[in-house]
Amino acid sequence: QVQLVESGGGLVQAGESLRLSCAPSGIFREIKSMGWYRQAPGKPREMVASITPGGNTNYASAAKDRHTISRTDANNTVPLRVGSLKRVDTAVYYCNGAVVLENYQLLEAWGPGALVIVSS
């Protein structure tokens, strides 16, 4: 069973930076696009950023100036750095990946989420 696991959430002060990370576990052939989504209280889940195995990135328009996504292809880890945190960044952050399984089926995998609370 393939799982994505987020790490790095917690309580942070406004103005600080935060680094989240996502790593897969289980058996698979490859992971294509990976990305980060977030869901703020009372709001729908929204895409923050995504990255392909070749390093091509895509950001939500509101995320471009304070978010940086990267990827280590060797182990498919995907860090997300969020700078100058604001209270509106309080959300559960989810890792997402398009995973090619051993039987070549494509699975859209999600992590359980990492809670980030920004205090002022």
Image (cartoon, helix red, strand yellow):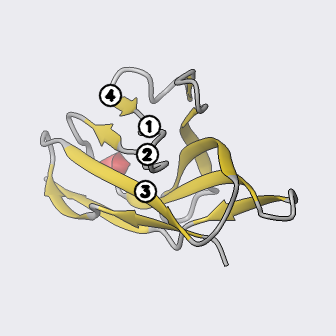
Image side of residue 119 versus residue 1, left or right: left
Q: Amino acid at mark 3?
A: Cys
Q: Are marks 1 and 4 in contact (CB under 8 Å)?
A: no
Residue denoted by label 2: 78
Residue at 59% of width from left, 32% of height from top? Answer: 53
Q: Position of residue 112 (x, y in %)?
A: 52, 73
Q: Earlier in the sequence, mark 3 or mark 2?
A: 3
Image side of residue 55 versus residue 107, left or right: left
Residue 22 numbered tag: 3
Q: Position of residue 64 (x, y in %)?
A: 44, 22
Q: Marks 4 and 2, how far apart in space?
A: 16 Å
Image side of residue 25 versus residue 106, left or right: left
For the residue pair 13 and 7, the one nearer the viewer reads as: 7
Q: Marks 1 and 2, how far apart in space?
A: 5 Å
Residue 27 in which image quadrant: bottom right
Q: Are marks 3 and 4 in contact (CB under 8 Å)?
A: no
Residue denoted by label 4: 66
Tell me if mark 4 has few (under 14), some (14-19) or many (20+) residues whose alpha carbon lies within 10 angstroms of its own.
few
Q: Amino acid at mark 2?
A: Val
Q: Amino acid at mark 1?
A: Arg
Task: Kindly state the secondary structure of the residue where label 2 is placed.
Answer: loop
Q: Marks 3 and 1, how far apart in space?
A: 10 Å
Please tell me whether mark 1 or mark 4 is closer to you in this view.
Answer: 1
Q: Amino acid at mark 4?
A: Arg
For the residue pair 18 and 51, the one nearer the viewer reads as: 51
Q: Marks 1 and 4, how far apart in space?
A: 17 Å
Residue 71 numbered tag: 1
Residue at 57% of width from left, 21% of height from top? Answer: 56
Please tell me whether mark 3 or mark 4 is closer to you in this view.
Answer: 3
Q: Are marks 3 and 2 in contact (CB under 8 Å)?
A: yes
For the residue pair 34 and 72, the one nearer the viewer reads as: 72
